């Protein structure tokens, strides 16, 4: 590729998966119109690490960039954005759409007089990651404004087969859960968007599908580069444990924010050193726990020595992140008087316990005090039909 604006891109021969972005670069007629708005961030790259905004700007059709939580460049922490600005590389306006009302987004799109809205962003395969909610909100706004909506699809990094955890009860819908799908849902972002449209009875978005992706693929199988989706999700190892350990965001324990291993280490100043041994004694599949001490530089227990564990995934094929996270919660709740549940951060989630928003129901919080085994807490997945699969 000679420069960031070229559109005569050809994928490297070793790449096994061709993303929706790469297909659009090869054939810009896949999205009609002369004025496009792009919902994106720095996770949307070609196989040779050119950003979607820079690559698509070469078509001359981009008119604006829409940014999700963490901002276009991913510098903001959880619950924050980089706010409206101008992109220095393209000169395009950046519109912050995180937690925005669909009607406000629709009005902004009308004012820009765009012919199409495109979403290209890397999801992480977990219901409570907010990128899917933002895509759904922007899709809804686009339909309200009478503007076609397109998703440039990307792989689910956790694979497209395995589903784990409960669905979402309607009263608990929020930015950390828009759809009634399992916590680990096994869908691509394009499939999530189409499922959301079917559920809402609105026009289906057009999905520019991948080529070469199989549902059983791990991220390593795709041959694609990993770009950290947010400041606290640096690696694919983090993404694998996130469906379970992110539940600790709803508790008084640190989920590892403010360390170099967020979501892979969990602990608190009052937790005992027996936590790791007790977890290992459970014999959970595909995982082992190492006793760990750490001092968060920000977030919960900043500057305090925390006792806890590092989660080591030994066999990703056997590892069950949601079950593992629940087992960790159940044990932690009985190991010290410092355990408790937190209310949500001030990002429009309401006054319910944050754990209820994450779990999608109050059942986890209500069951843990008297639970003796994980089956007392985790009901079998009942969401068998989640819409038409694209792959």
Image (cartoon, rainbow, N blue to C red):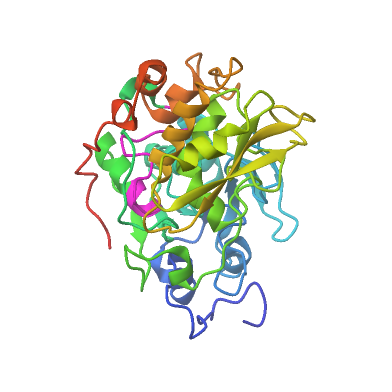
Residue 241 horizontal/vertical position (percent): 50, 47
The residue depicted at 55 percent of the width and 76 percent of the height is 7
Residue at the outermost bottom position: 13
The quadrant holding residue 364 is: top left
Q: Horizontally, is 82 left or right of 201 in the view?
A: right
Residue 204 horizontal/vertical position (percent): 29, 48
**Would residue 100 be visible to someone looking at this image?**
no
The residue depicted at 50 percent of the width and 55 percent of the height is 122
What secondary structure is the stretch in magenta mostly built from? Answer: loop
Residue 89 horizontal/vertical position (percent): 73, 61
Give the magenta part as a residue range.
174-193
The tally of labels here is 0
**Would residue 317 be visible to someone looking at this image?**
yes
Q: Which quadrant of the rendered structure holds the N terminus?
A: bottom right
The residue depicted at 66 percent of the width and 82 percent of the height is 2
Classify 120 as above or below 23.
Answer: above
């Amino acid at each position: 590729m000679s420069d960031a604006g070229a559109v005569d891109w050809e994928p490297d021969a070793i790449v096994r998966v061709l993303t929706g972005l790469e297909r659009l670069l090869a054939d810009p007629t896949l999205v009609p119109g002369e004025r496009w708005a792009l919902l994106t961030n720095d996770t949307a790259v070609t196989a040779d690490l050119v950003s979607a905004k820079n690559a698509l700007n070469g078509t001359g059709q981009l008119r604006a960039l829409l940014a999700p939580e963490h901002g276009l460049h991913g510098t903001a922490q959880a619950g924050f954005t980089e706010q409206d600005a101008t992109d220095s590389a393209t000169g395009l306006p950046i519109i912050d759409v995180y937690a925005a009302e669909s009607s406000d987004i629709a009005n902004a799109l009308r004012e820009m007089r765009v012919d199409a809205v495109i979403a290209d962003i890397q999801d992480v395969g977990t219901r409570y990651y907010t990128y899917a909610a933002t895509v759904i909100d922007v899709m809804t706004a686009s339909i309200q404004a009478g503007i076609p909506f397109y998703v440039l699809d990307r792989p689910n990094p956790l694979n497209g087969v395995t589903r784990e955890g409960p669905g979402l009860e309607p009263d608990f819908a929020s930015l950390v859960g828009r759809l009634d799908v399992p916590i680990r849902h096994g869908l691509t972002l394009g499939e999530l968007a189409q499922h959301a449209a079917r559920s809402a009875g609105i026009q289906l978005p057009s999905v520019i599908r991948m080529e070469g992706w199989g549902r059983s693929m791990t991220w390593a199988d795709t041959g694609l580069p990993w770009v950290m989706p947010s400041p606290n999700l640096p690696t694919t190892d983090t993404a694998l444990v996130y469906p379970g350990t992110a539940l600790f965001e709803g508790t008084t324990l640190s989920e590892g924010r403010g360390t170099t291993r967020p979501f892979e280490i969990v602990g608190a100043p009052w937790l005992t050193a027996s936590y790791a041994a007790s977890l290992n004694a459970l014999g959970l599949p595909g995982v082992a726990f190492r006793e760990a001490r750490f001092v968060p530089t920000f977030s919960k227990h900043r500057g305090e020595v925390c006792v806890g564990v590092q989660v080591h995934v030994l066999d990703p094929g056997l590892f069950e992140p949601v079950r593992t996270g629940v087992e960790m919660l159940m044990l932690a709740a009985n190991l010290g008087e410092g355990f408790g549940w937190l209310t949500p951060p001030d990002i429009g989630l309401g006054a319910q316990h944050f754990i209820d928003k994450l779990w999608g129901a109050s059942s986890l919080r209500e069951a843990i005090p008297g639970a003796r085994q994980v089956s007392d807490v985790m009901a079998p997945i009942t969401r068998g039909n989640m819409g038409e699969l694209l792959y």
